[in-house]
Amino acid sequence: MPSLFRTRLHAQAIPTVLTLLASVFLALTLGGCASLAPGPEPASPAQLAAWEDHSSRLKMLTDWAFDGRAAIKSGTTGGSVRLEWMQVGDVTALTMRGPFDTGRLAMTGTPDHMLITDGKGNRRLTDTPAELLEQQIGWPIPLAALPHWLLGLPKTPLAHRPADSFQLDQTGRLLRLSEAGWELNYARYATESTGLSLPHFIELRRGETRIRLIVDDWNLGGTAP
């Protein structure tokens, strides 16, 4: 190949190579910027102060109840259930109606010790209620943490948690929480007759499991804490 022709070929190729290099550099730069993008802003002192006031009132609620619904999806399975939940101190009374084998499950006790009764009247006392419940309905349910999460409280106090594991709104209510391997998003609150603001729509995620929980009606006993 004549040397003059080779020189012209190289000269024509240089702009193309430079363009490719510039594209690669830009992609790497943008990728680096994306990976370094800041997460949610830490809670401000005002938000934390509002949280202290809000959460202190929630913690005074020892007895409460609600009626609601949950849509659950885990992998390729899922379904909808009706919920009736009553909490008296540490004792939970939960009734679920859904598409599982017996159509109804009633649970009474604490997260460490519960009596479970199915729709056929079969009873079983268990020291591992979360595991037994998953066997019965086919989906994992975080029983130990739910009495806290349902009210909009973490099981572990926020003061003992990493700043990036939660997010508060301007009135001190939880918007997002990462705890016990679950990701929670609080999509809707409403102010009850007692003056407390309580969750009405919570989404919980862990791996392939997603639970969308809707509270239709809270019963707080009619007395503001």
Image (cartoon, helix red, strand yellow):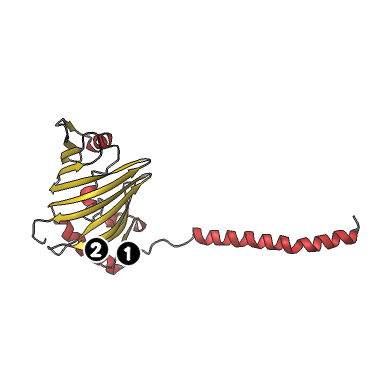
Q: Residues within 10 Å of mark 1 (few under 14, many from 20)?
A: some
Q: Which mark is residue 51?
A: 2
Q: Which residue is mark 1?
A: 43
Relative depth, front residue between 72 and 90: 72
Q: Amino acid at mark 1?
A: Ala
In x, y percent, where is residue 61?
14, 55
Residue 122 sits in quarter: top left
Q: Is residue 206 above or below residue 200?
A: above
Q: Amino acid at mark 2?
A: Trp
Relative depth, front residue between 70 and 202: 70
Q: Secondary structure at mark 2?
A: helix
Relative depth, front residue between 163 and 216: 216
Residue 152 sits in quarter: bottom left
Residue 92 sits in quarter: top left
Q: Residue at x 32, y 67 (%)?
A: 44
Q: Residue furthest bottom?
A: 46
Q: Quadrant of the C terminus?
A: bottom left
Q: Residues within 10 Å of mark 2 (few under 14, many from 20)?
A: many
Q: Is 201 left or right of 32, judged from the image as shown?
A: left
In x, y percent, where is residue 3?
90, 59
- Kindly check if marks 1 and 2 are in contact, taking CB atoms under 8 A apart as contact: yes
Q: Secondary structure at mark 1?
A: loop
In x, y percent, where is residue 98?
23, 41
